[in-house]
Image: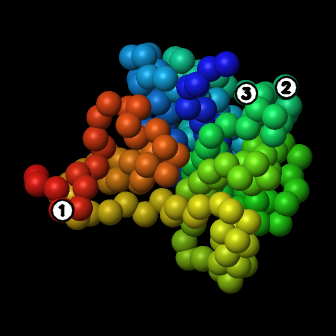
Amino acid sequence: MSTARRLVLAVTGASGAIYAQRALSLLSAAITEGADLRVDWVASATAGQVWAAEREEPLPDAFPGLQRWDRHDFEAPFASGSSAPDAVVLMPCSMSNLARVANGGGDDLIARACEVALKERKTLILVVRETPLSLVHLRNMVAATEAGAIILPAVPSFYAGVSTLEQAVDTVVARVFDRAGVSELLGAELLRRWGASA
């Protein structure tokens, strides 16, 4: 049996496709260079529309080394608790997907991956992207946290000498990779850590 770290990344229709694009590109590069990592990914029904609007290009069909699944393909191994991944990341995470995690339900592979992560006590990271937040959003974040998810808002940090959009994006992606337990497999520091010399 493989000992590779297993990660599922779901791209939803929230604004913030740039985060998913950067993460998928970095994961693809790491695997191509031999990282002991397996990455499966899936996109929601609206992810492609948002990606095209924000990135001015179609959502790619593939990233080298990564396995893409259709959102209705329940043959994906991570659809079962018997093959639960080490971490599931929704990046960006829409408020609709947050609500599904907080309250259960949903009929696609993204919802199922989240259910599996929670029931198997695996890491579930929701990179929420919305502003302002309604009371419904806030209550759903509390409920998702109580169920075991990690709410990691797509909020860049600026203490590390950030001066470009790409660097700001990397501050969020780095935190996601830290929580997913894959930072050490990527071979490059995306973020100058607090207290580290410039």
Amino acid residing under circle 1: Gly
Q: Position of residue 77 (x, y in %)?
A: 77, 28
- What's the distance in space between the residues labelled 3 and 1, CA to CA? 40 Å
In the rendered image, the vertical position of residue 133 relative to residue 8, given as above or below: below
Q: Position of residue 30 (x, y in %)?
A: 41, 25
Residue at 52 percent of width and 46 percent of height: 180
The quadrant of the image that shows the N terminus is: top right
Within 10 Å of disc 2 (Cα), the crowding (few <14, some 14-19, many 20+) is few
Between disc 2 and disc 1, the foreground one is 1
Q: Which residue is mark 3?
A: 69
Residue at 30 percent of width and 43 percent of height: 190
Amino acid residing under circle 3: Trp
In the rendered image, the vertical position of residue 108 relative to residue 134, given as above or below: above
Q: What mark, if any, has residue 75 been given in the picture?
A: 2
Q: Is residue 164 left or right of residue 93?
A: left
In the rendered image, the vertical position of residue 196 relative to residue 133, given as above or below: above
